[in-house]
């Protein structure tokens, strides 16, 4: 089963980093967050990826082109006709297709553009800016058992503000807000049937609007509740937090050895 990664946006809310490179190439612990996401899927045996690139898409292609150089010791022998020797190559068994899906294309349009690489097969989809420790095998099994056209992973995230418990115009308690006070959100990590392509019109289609709403109204959108770790790298603060977690050895999304 192929894994589609949405990696074409501008990342304007983390412009301190994304002005120089695509947001999925912003690094956590010296490696792009895209790499971290792929490592999570690879842990469960999914190694066939389609990257929907856009903004500065050449940087994603160049990074993968040189990936084995990033992970191996190399010798540059200029005395033997500029010979390159790679030692102890340790790259993952990945098959990566990077597709230029356009600079201003919306999420649904990006998915539509890679239809020819999917064909009539079930596929997975997620965003290139969030890491989590979801059990992908359990997610896929849930999708198969549930029998719907689409399944998304839902999470509850802790809110920043305190909660007022109010009764008859009086505050009865003031407490920290917990996950049980939060509405679930779409965390990505979706499993989709190829029929969803019929809901994608053109580059202007926003996947999170008409397509997902139509699937929901038709009773064809399943929700796999994930109670473990999930965090999006949407701001400089979240970028710093993820890097601190990684450097301290406390990175829950690192499920691989």
Image: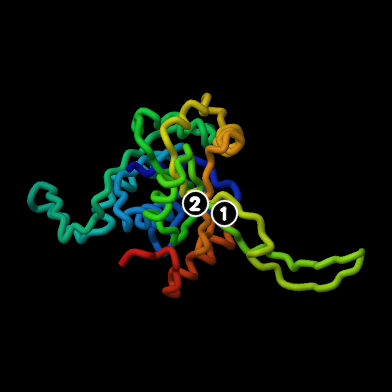
How many numbered discs?
Answer: 2
Task: Tell me if 129 is positioned left or right of 79 in this view.
Answer: right
The quarter holding residue 30 reads bottom left
User: Which residue is nearer to you in this view: 218 or 100?
Assistant: 218
What percent of the width, then of the height, locates residue 32?
41, 55
What percent of the width, then of the height, locates residue 132?
46, 59
The quarter holding residue 214 reads top right
Determine whether 232 is above or below 245 in the image: above
Q: Mark yes or no: residue 35 visible.
A: no
Q: Quadrant of the N terminus?
A: top left
Q: Secondary structure at mark 2?
A: loop
Residue that carries the numbered disc 1 in the rendered image? 234
Q: Quadrant of the C terminus?
A: bottom left
User: Which residue is nearer to you in this view: 255 or 87?
Assistant: 255
Which residue is farthest left? 80
Residue that carries the numbered disc 2 in the rendered image? 129
Q: Mark yes or no: residue 39 visible.
A: yes
Give the residue drawn at x 50%, y 64%: 228
What percent of the width, then of the height, locates residue 24?
45, 49
Task: Tell me if 99 is positioned left or right of 80 in this view.
Answer: right
Q: Secondary structure at mark 1?
A: loop
Give the residue drawn at x 15%, y 51%: 84
Give the residue drawn at x 55%, y 47%: 11
| Tags 1 and 2 touching, CB below 8 Å | yes
Give the residue drawn at x 15%, y 59%: 87
């Amino acid at each position: 089963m192929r894994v589609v990664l949405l990696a074409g946006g501008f990342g304007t809310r983390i412009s301190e980093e994304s002005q120089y490179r695509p947001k999925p190439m912003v690094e956590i612990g010296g490696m792009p967050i895209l790499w971290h996401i792929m490592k999570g899927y690879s842990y469960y045996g999914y190694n066939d990826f389609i990257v929907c690139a856009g903004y500065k898409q050449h940087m994603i292609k160049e990074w993968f082109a040189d990936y084995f150089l990033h992970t191996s010791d190399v010798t540059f022998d200029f005395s033997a006709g500029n010979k390159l020797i790679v030692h102890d190559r340790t790259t993952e068994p990945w098959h990566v297709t990077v597709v230029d899906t356009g600079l201003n294309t919306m999420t649904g349009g990006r998915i539509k553009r890679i239809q020819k690489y999917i064909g009539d097969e079930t596929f997975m989809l997620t965003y290139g800016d969030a890491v989590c420790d979801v059990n992908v095998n359990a997610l896929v099994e849930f999708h198969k058992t549930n029998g719907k056209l689409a399944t998304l992973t839902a999470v509850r995230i802790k809110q920043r503000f305190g909660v007022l418990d109010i009764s008859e115009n009086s505050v009865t308690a003031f407490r920290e807000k917990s996950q049980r006070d939060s509405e679930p959100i779409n965390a990505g990590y979706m499993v989709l049937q190829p029929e969803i392509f019929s809901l994608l019109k053109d580059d202007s289609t926003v996947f999170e609007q008409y397509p997902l709403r139509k699937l929901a109204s038709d009773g064809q959108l399943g929700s796999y509740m994930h109670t473990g770790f999930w965090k999006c790298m949407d701001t400089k603060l979240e970028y710093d937090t993820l890097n601190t977690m990684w450097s301290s050895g406390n990175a829950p999304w690192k499920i691989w050895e």
